[in-house]
Image (tube, grey):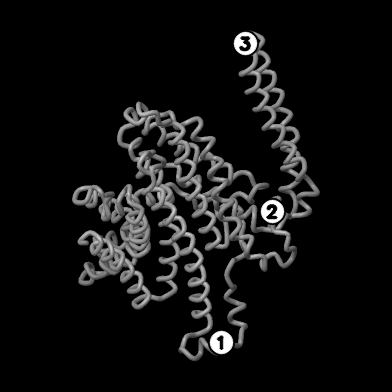
């Protein structure tokens, strides 16, 4: 009973912090923290599934989140018809040729006996296939990227709403599970090659592959405009301008004394919060059911002692691959949700500090191996991530209030406010590891 009261109290404290932000600062800021907290909690659940259940040290979270964002663009944006006519088929044919080249090389390696014939055949297939792939693919890419590069320059997506594509908001919701599928597919490829590595080597491999994913997204303009960014993604919730043009909405906003611009922004953020809450609850319930099932007990047994589990007949490698795919898929779903919330895809914004390190801090602080702990960590750490800088500025202004305007120490302290986030995250992590090494809500 004491444990339950303690856990509920922790969630209540975090809820009070978010509500206090609304009362002291603004409700728009509070709802932004709430929405990003919901998305962060989902990411933390995905990482907890991999680390807390199976002990897999994945530091490539950023790549899976980015794949979710890419899915949001490819599903919810309209196709660029001129680009498809100019070079779309060449791009697709080039990708097919590239896949066929790799498949043929694998077939030769598997079917031909070792020797000069096998080596020469493999080299010929790879070299010939590479040049053929580049010839077809590059021509198509150049044609696609030349089509109105200032506003499109890419193939677009699968939203066939035409000029009214923004009214097809349901396509954005469809992109969320598709983002999970994208991340799961890449996780399968990574898992088949890297899960046999020791934990530290696995971490290096996943980090490197996530950087490759981001590099591809930044440089392949035909895919999602690269660093030019895709903006104006359709929304599954109303647009603020539509609410502000509604007589009923204006009347209700006036009745409670809130200006229409603020009221419309709050309503939109609340609508997002409702959708994100549904997704979080579904994933949390499924994660809890998995944790309490024989499968969950088997995964924890593998985590605690792989040799003993293998001796009992468990296929450790297959189970590691399974949970690696599941955890990555959840991160992909969260990535698609975040891109939907932002209404844009900006590959340059995906940084390991924000989308890997911070998620790990959430899992560790909340409680590795405990799903509710990961959710708590998601909300708490993102709240601090947003609020530490303004709180640091307030603190530094208070400390330096009696100093002269041109005082060197005062200037240095005020300029250091921008680094308060990193200092605070590191300090929190050290304190938790020292005084609560199992997290605020530890695994039972």
For disc 2, the neighbor class at 10 Å (few under 14, some 14 to 19, many from 20) is many
Q: Nearer the viewer, mark 3 or mark 2?
A: 3
Q: Quadrant of residue 137?
A: top right
Residue 435 x %, y %? 19, 51
Numbered disc 2: secondary structure = loop
Residue in the picture at 35% in, 78% down: 23
Q: CB of mark 3 within 8 Å of CB of mark 2? A: no
For disc 1, the neighbor class at 10 Å (few under 14, some 14 to 19, many from 20) is some
Query: Is residue 196 something that shows in the picture?
Result: yes
Q: Nearer the viewer, mark 1 or mark 3?
A: 3
Q: Tell me which numbered mark, 3 or 2, is placed earlier along the sequence.
A: 3
> Which residue has dot 1 on it?
250
Residue in the picture at 65% in, 13% down: 112
Observer-nearest residue: 114 or 342? 114
Q: Tell me which numbered mark, 1 or 3, is placed earlier along the sequence.
A: 3
Q: CA distance from mark 2 to mark 1?
A: 36 Å
């Amino acid at each position: 009973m004491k444990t339950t009261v303690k856990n509920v109290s922790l969630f209540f404290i975090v809820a009070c912090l978010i509500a206090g932000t609304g009362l002291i600062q603004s409700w728009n800021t509070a709802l932004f923290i709430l929405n990003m907290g919901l998305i962060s909690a989902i990411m933390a659940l995905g990482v907890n599934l991999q680390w807390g259940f199976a002990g897999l040290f994945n530091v490539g979270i950023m790549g899976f989140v980015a794949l979710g964002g890419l899915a949001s663009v490819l599903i919810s944006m309209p196709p660029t018809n001129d680009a498809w006519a100019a070079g779309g088929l060449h791009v697709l044919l080039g990708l097919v040729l590239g896949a066929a080249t790799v498949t043929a090389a694998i077939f030769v390696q598997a079917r031909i006996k070792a020797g000069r014939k096998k080596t020469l055949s493999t080299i010929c297939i790879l070299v010939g296939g590479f040049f053929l792939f580049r010839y077809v693919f590059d021509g198509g890419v150049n044609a696609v990227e030349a089509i109105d590069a200032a506003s499109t320059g890419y193939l677009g997506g699968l939203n066939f709403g035409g000029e009214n594509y923004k009214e097809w908001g349901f396509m954005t919701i469809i992109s969320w599970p598709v983002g999970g599928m994208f991340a799961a597919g890449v996780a399968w490829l990574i898992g088949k090659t890297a899960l046999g590595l020791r934990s530290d080597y696995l971490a290096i491999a996943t980090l490197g592959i996530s950087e490759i994913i981001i590099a591809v997204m930044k440089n392949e303009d035909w895919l999602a405009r690269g660093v030019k960014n895709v903006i104006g993604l359709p929304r599954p919730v109303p647009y603020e301008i539509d609410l502000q043009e509604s007589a009923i909405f204006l009347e209700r906003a006036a009745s409670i004394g809130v200006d229409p611009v603020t009221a419309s922004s709050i309503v939109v953020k609340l609508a997002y919060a409702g959708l994100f809450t549904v997704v979080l609850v579904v994933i949390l319930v499924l994660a809890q059911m998995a944790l309490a099932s024989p499968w969950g007990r088997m995964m924890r047994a593998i985590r605690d002692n792989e040799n003993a589990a293998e001796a009992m007949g468990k296929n450790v490698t297959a189970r590691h691959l399974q949970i690696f795919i599941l955890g990555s898929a959840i991160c992909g779903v969260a990535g698609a949700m975040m891109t939907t919330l932002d209404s844009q895809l900006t590959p340059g914004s995906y940084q390991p500090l924000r989308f890997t390190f911070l998620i790990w801090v959430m899992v560790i602080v909340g409680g590795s191996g405990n799903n509710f702990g990961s959710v708590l960590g998601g909300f708490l750490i993102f709240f601090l991530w947003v609020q530490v800088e303004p709180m640091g500025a307030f603190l530094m202004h208070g400390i330096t209030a009696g100093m002269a305007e041109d005082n060197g120490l005062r200037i240095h302290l005020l300029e250091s406010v921008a680094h308060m986030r990193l200092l605070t995250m590191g300090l929190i992590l050290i304190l938790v590891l020292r005084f609560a090494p199992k997290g605020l809500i530890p695994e039972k």
